[in-house]
Amino acid sequence: MVERFFRDLSQQAILPGSFGSVAELVDTINRYLSQHNLEPKRYVWHADGQEVLNKIRRAWASRHKSCHFGFIVCFRVNFSEVR
């Protein structure tokens, strides 16, 4: 969601504009935020927490298998402690 917000801010407010000063850029961003906040949309989390943790475990396991010492520093995580 954060990435989408900043993408929209960039595409709708910053990229189409031309700014002669930092103050103009800040004013444009503030106008965008004011308009955006007129219709706030609540974010509802749909992912299951256990699925997220399982995905993290798989990613860490995959990364650990492909570590080459000297190029990548590997970290070990005890997932039994993650709650």
Image (cartoon, rainbow, N blue to C red):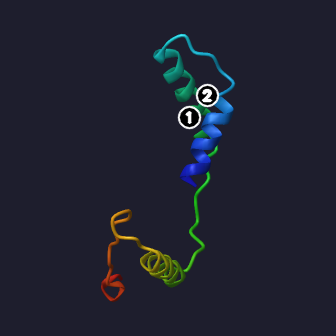
Residue 73 in which image quadrant: bottom left
Residue 13 or 55: which is nearer the viewer? 55
Tell whether 17 sits left or right of 22. Answer: right
User: Mark 2 and 1 residues: CB-CB less than 8 Å, in contact?
Assistant: no
Q: Earlier in the sequence, mark 2 or mark 1?
A: 2
Where disc 2 sits, the SS reads helix
Q: Identify the residue position indicated by label 2 in the image.
A: 14
Q: Give the secondary structure at mark 1.
A: helix
Q: Is residue 30 above or below residue 61?
A: above
Q: Residues within 10 Å of mark 1 (few under 14, many from 20)?
A: few
* Pointer 1 residue: 33
| Vertical comparison of 37 with 54: above or below | above
Q: The residue under label 2 is which amino acid type?
A: Ile
Q: Residues within 10 Å of mark 2 (few under 14, many from 20)?
A: some
Instruction: Name the spot of residue 66 as percent of width and height, x first.
Output: 47, 75
Instruction: State how many labels appear.
Output: 2
Quarter containing the N terminus = bottom right
Q: Amino acid at mark 1?
A: Leu
Q: Residue at x 53, y 21 (%)?
A: 25
Quarter occupied by residue 76: bottom left
Reply above or below: 44 against 28. Answer: below
**What x and y, as percent, mark residue 22?**
47, 17
| Residue at image coords 50%, 76% | 59
Can residue 40 be seen in the rendering of this structure?
no
**For the residues marked 2 and 1, what is the alpha-carbon distance in whole angstroms?**
12 Å
Task: Please name whichever residue, 23 or 58, is drawn nearer the observer in this view of the structure.
Answer: 58
What residue is rendered at 63% in x and 16% in y? Answer: 18
